Amino acid sequence: MEFKTMYHPSAGREPLLQTFEEFGVNLHPEEELPVNEEPWRPFCSRGDFEFAEIALNAALNKSQINALLALIGRISRGESRVTFSNDNELRKAWEHAAAQVTPFVKHDITVPYKKEQRVYETHALPLWDWALDLLANPLLAPHFVWDAQRVFKHNGREFERFYNEPWMGDRWWDFQSRLPSDIKAAPFCFILYADKTRLSSHGTVKGYPVVVRCANLPVGIRNGEGIGGGRVVRWLPIVSEDADEEGKPGFVNLKRVIWHEAFLKLLELVAQHSKSGYSHTCYDKIARWLFPIILILSADYEEQCMMSLIRGHHSKCPCPVCLVLLEELSELSKTFAFRTVEEAIAALNVYKVSKARGEELLKALGLCAVTNVFWLIVHSDPHQAISFDRLHALHLGMWRHLLEELKKILKALGRDEESKVEKQVASFPRWRNLNHFSTIIHITFSDGNKMQDLSKQAFYSAVNVLNQRTSPEGYKLLRVISSYLQLDSYIGLDVHTSSTLAAIDAELLVFDSALKEYIECALNSPIVGLKLDWDFPKAHLWKHATRDIRMKGAVRNYSTRPNEKLHGPLKEAYERQSNGKDVADQILRVDTRKFAAKMLRAHVDVLDERRTLAGEGNDDDEDPNPVAFEGHIKLGSTQQPVAIQDIETHGGQLDRAFQGFRKKFSDFINNSLPMYGYRLERWVTIPTNFLIREHRFLKVHYESTVDWKQTTDYLRCTPGFHGQPRYDCALIQLAQEVSVFVRLVFIFSCQLLDVGSFEFALVQPFTAGIGASRRSDRDLRLTCVKAVPRASSIFVPVQSFIRGAVCFPDPDHRDEFLMVDHIDSDMFVRMKSRPARQ
């Protein structure tokens, strides 16, 4: 019994012990949901709905829709025909057509635009009406979680508590403890996000959407793009900026008053029900009194200031959560008192009686003289609801400052050192879903995902350039970046335990020490312009990360990332489906249609799934060319069979790994197969014409060490992937207690007569002796491995692959590699249990 779940006492449920296989499975299987046989209603037919869905997603205008419907009519009457069967055929036809006309010539031009500001009317969908829509949806109903939980996993010695979903945090538990005990009361928990966004490509037209999500739904639904995901429920007004008034206290307060007044209509019913509750019979047939709470406020720092009504980054106390002083923001070793609603209300009450005395109190607290709308909702303290945002605090915050320091130091070292780092960044190993860069010196984008990826690549690419002898400032900075990457990886885990939270707190002290050493070094450095003042809010905010995780679960629960993804459709709606007038009204109309389309599509998909399971599916839907599958491994990019002697002859001329290929393979078969449980009656001889089939693509499914879910790595072993050779690395199980890193050389399958079919890989192990660890490896926490000679490559079954890996070639040490620990959470956790040198 690895898992233990303790429910809140008001749930009336006994603690639950489960095996690994049982954990996470629905404990109360419900009857099958009734299926609507016409889920496309109110459209007259499924065809009507699907046409409307395509037209909506493609942003077709009136003339385009009429033209397309006219074409469909002519096709149905036999007056015309369309021969295209897929997008590829259409593209080829356009290519042939385009070849007949003179091509465009590209020119780079710069067009200046005068900045404009507009004020928009506010639009709102009452928040409780949205909540009732969710509760009424039969596809979502079984997924709601009502009771707080404390969940534990046995670590071999004891049950250790872990934090994942919001209902596993202390805030949910504490809130549920305050609800009436004489009724079946349960929390309905909201997550609110707000931020301005540029709608027009030139940035003069802006929008101010508010997005809501339901914390009672699992993260896969809540942060997804389908039903149950985020919904724009408010369009806040943007107050025009006046150069003469901007920055003045009265004008700043005016914007805050408008913001909170605009939120009031959105929250009216929520505020009422937070006091009295709302009776609702849930999907499990249990009548509950639902009490709404604003559990999480997700925003960047600017919006956090608006939500908490603090005065901003120049105020005396610029943190929206605690009362840290401006001059102590970088002091991560110190702890400060948390803000409370009670002290804010008391200061505002004094202000209403005596502005002078009240202003003095408010200024000391860093607060504005404005009533906070969140005070109207019971137990919805905005200072507790405001949550650490990894995107803006780290990837678009602290890392940007570190990157600027890195650029300054490289520039001081000279063009040759800059060029060396640039080349190493450009040659960083490719990896799925990892952005790659050709430069770090001339970075102009502000994409948080790219910044996150750049931080990993810049660090490893600069290790051999910024050493203690040639650049003491650079070396100190690398120690700061190393600690930053440790913290970023730890904080980004989707499941936290008491151990990982303790590790974050300990690493914050390491970062604090490394940063102070860098500041001291920069103070005495001849390099002009190095940053000495690190007292800014984003240097402090991650001080509250562990508290937020304990209170509200993993950081993905309150990340702004999934909310900012919704900005894209809003911009598209402005550019393609509005006429530039009454923008908010038009965009929200389009957004509502898309939300309705998602709802209908979900029900249509359920109907299709049920019909498929009932045997009504179309056999043509099956993959005509299934990929070879064996256990947790899938082979792909299959080549034509080739004689083994040809592989040895052609490959051996270019790569010593293929020399003696046939003999080495014969020895491997006869010596190793018996250890794998295959009985060989005689020595297996491999003839020169023995056929093997090469595979250049490999999928590896494995269980994540972080959240215990299946994850997949995509590995390439090919001389040409997007025009470049790519031979990925992997972690394999070499023996029962030994796992090692390897580089792929060749993947193949074959048929052994009277034995069976097999899938093997020729790999170059990274198991060569590397000697004592270097000081830089210890200081920067680098994991180093060394490859054996290519001629010493070995055969292994593909079943021995554990997962993929990224190994960065050490430019200063031949055949040595630095393991990229931070490539994902699973690798980060695995590497914590491995020695730094192997």
Image: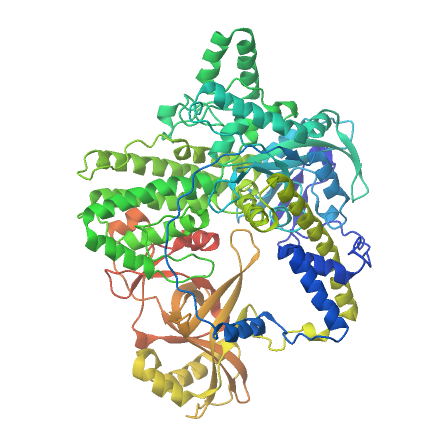
From the viewer's perspective, tell me whether residue 51 is left or right of residue 730.
right
Rendering quarter of residue 352: top right
* Outermost residue, top side: 354
Display colour scheme: rainbow
Task: Answer left or right for 659 relative to 124.
Answer: left
- Residue 174's x, y, as percent? 63, 30
Work out whether residue 246 or residue 624 is closer to the camera in this orientation and state it.
246
Q: Position of residue 618 (x, y in %)?
A: 73, 72
Q: Residue 307: x percent and y percent?
A: 54, 29
636 versus 551 height, above or below: below
Tell me the quarter of the picture where residue 731 sits: bottom left
Q: Which residue is at the front of the view, 652 or 415?
A: 415
Name the side, left or right, on which 561 lies relative to 18: left
Q: How many marks?
A: 0
Residue 194 placement (x, y as % from top left): 56, 36
Residue nearest the observer in this picture, 93 or 813: 93
Residue 694, compared with residue 448, is above or below; it is below
Quarter of the image where the C terminus is located: bottom left
Q: Is residue 480 visible?
A: no
Q: Nearer the viewer, residue 23 or 191?
A: 191
Q: Say which residue appears at 51% left-offset and 89% top-offset.
A: 681
Asked whether residue 342 is in view, the answer is yes
The answer to whether 18 is drawn above or below residue 208 in the figure is: below
Q: Quadrant of residue 15?
A: top right
